[in-house]
Image (cartoon, rainbow, N blue to C red):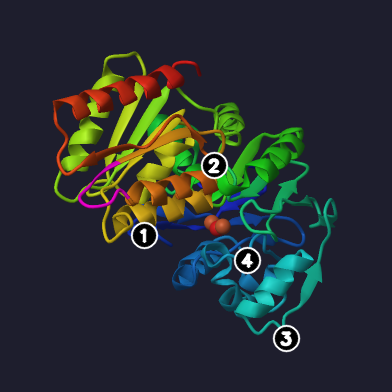
Amino acid sequence: MNTQLSKSVTWVGYVDWAVRDFHGYRTPRGSTYNAYLVAGAHPALIDTVKAPYVDSLLAHVRERLPLEQIAYLVCNHAEPDHAGGLAQVVAACPNATVICNKKCADALRHHFDTSTWKMRLVTDGETLDLGGCTLQFFDTPMVHWPESMATYLIEEQVLFSMDAFGQHCAGPWRFDDEAPMDVVMAEAKTYYANIVMPYGRPVAAVLERLGALPLQIVAPSHGVIWRSHFAQILEAYQAWVVCRPARKVVILFSTMWDSTRAMAQAMAEGVEETAADLRLLDLDAVHDTEVAAEVLDCACLAVGSPTLNQGIMPRLASTLTYLRGLKPVGKAGIVFGSYGWAARGVDEMTHYLQTMQITSLGEAVTCRFRPDAAMLEKCRETGRVLARYALTK
Ligand code: FEO
């Protein structure tokens, strides 16, 4: 496996083939926790890995130099997938000083006993001379936590971009030009939707600032390292930070006795009469991770549930709570569902859409018990309305 990024930089991270759940995010292809060793008279390790995989990280480092030679441990981000192993690494590298910003130091103090650590706090734009290599640090707040930071190796134009441009994708490859790009881009989109989407505005600011640097290599903390196709992921990010809509309708539903399913399917038929793209997402079959990725670039969505206990199906409530936290912007929508005695579910769904600032495309479509032919035609027409809106994008 080729792990050499540039003259002075080596990948020393961990490929996690087994992880399938990342704090609720389904990761069918696993992930990687990328850490990087930067050579110099005073070598630096950029980030660590999840705590259980520190032995692998340290073995990779030892293949290149004794741990006593590590002068700096750069912590770009305090989240445990990158800093979880930091206490063990500090203990194993007796001559190392931890480099991080003030907010990160505060977070680390709440994860570990840092009272005996050698620490140096750096500020935005500050540089660190490794003796032959120079690191520069850039605060990247909210990408993906408030303390997040990117590190730039000036001489070799390598940007350690932390979570930005990452993907949860294990593989035998380390570089974009070694990996199947359709898989990488799909996973990058899913990663953006589920991790980074709430922070579109700060991400856009980071893109503008860091994108202006001369870049030979962009090395994120998960997935492939960008050395040949960075323009492709940068262009994709420019669309994702504004949730730029495709001509796509998402119909998202949960059903109890199949009436709401019949309504959803009739809406889908209405969309299918047009040139608009369509995703019909039954929450009995589709995970929230996939829902988020589809909502990221949809133009509009229909959200459906029967009324259950004067509310909505718990499965849909869970998904809408998750989506609300991810803050997709610029979407339009409509709600629908069957009911038996009182059409209360649509009120709850409408409230969700309002709090997500989703523009209403019309009145809720409700059906008592089972949809008859007239109701199914009304649902088809709703599908056409959604499609016509999507085709304006
Ligand atoms: Fe990959 Fe925000 O940690």
Q: Amino acid at mark 4?
A: Ala
Whether 299 is among the magenta residues is no
Q: Secondary structure at mark 2?
A: loop
Q: Secondary structure at mark 4?
A: loop
Q: Amino acid at mark 1?
A: Asp
Picture residue at 40% right of the left edge, 49% below the top: 347
Residue 257 in percent (x, y) is at 14, 48
Q: Nearer the viewer, residue 197 or 126?
A: 197
Q: On screen, 390 above or below 203?
A: above
Earlier along the polypeptide chain: callout 2 or callout 4?
Answer: 4
**Quadrant holding ligand 1?**
bottom right
Q: Is residue 332 left or right of residue 313?
A: right
Which residue lies under the disc numbered 2?
A: 225
Q: CA distance from mark 3 to mark 4?
A: 18 Å
Q: CA distance from mark 1 to mark 2?
A: 22 Å
Residue 314 in percent (x, y) is at 31, 59
Mark 1 C-beta to ligand 1 under 8 Å:
no
Which residue lies under the disc numbered 3?
A: 116
Q: Residues within 10 Å of mark 3 (few under 14, many from 20)?
A: few
Q: Amino acid at mark 3?
A: Thr
Q: Are marks 1 and 3 in contact (CB under 8 Å)?
A: no
Task: Please identify, in this view, whether the residue under mark 1 or under mark 3 is nearer the observer.
Answer: 1
Magenta stretch, residue numbers: 337-343
Earlier along the polypeptide chain: callout 4 or callout 1?
Answer: 1
Q: Residues within 10 Å of mark 2 (few under 14, many from 20)?
A: many
Mark number for residue 78? 4
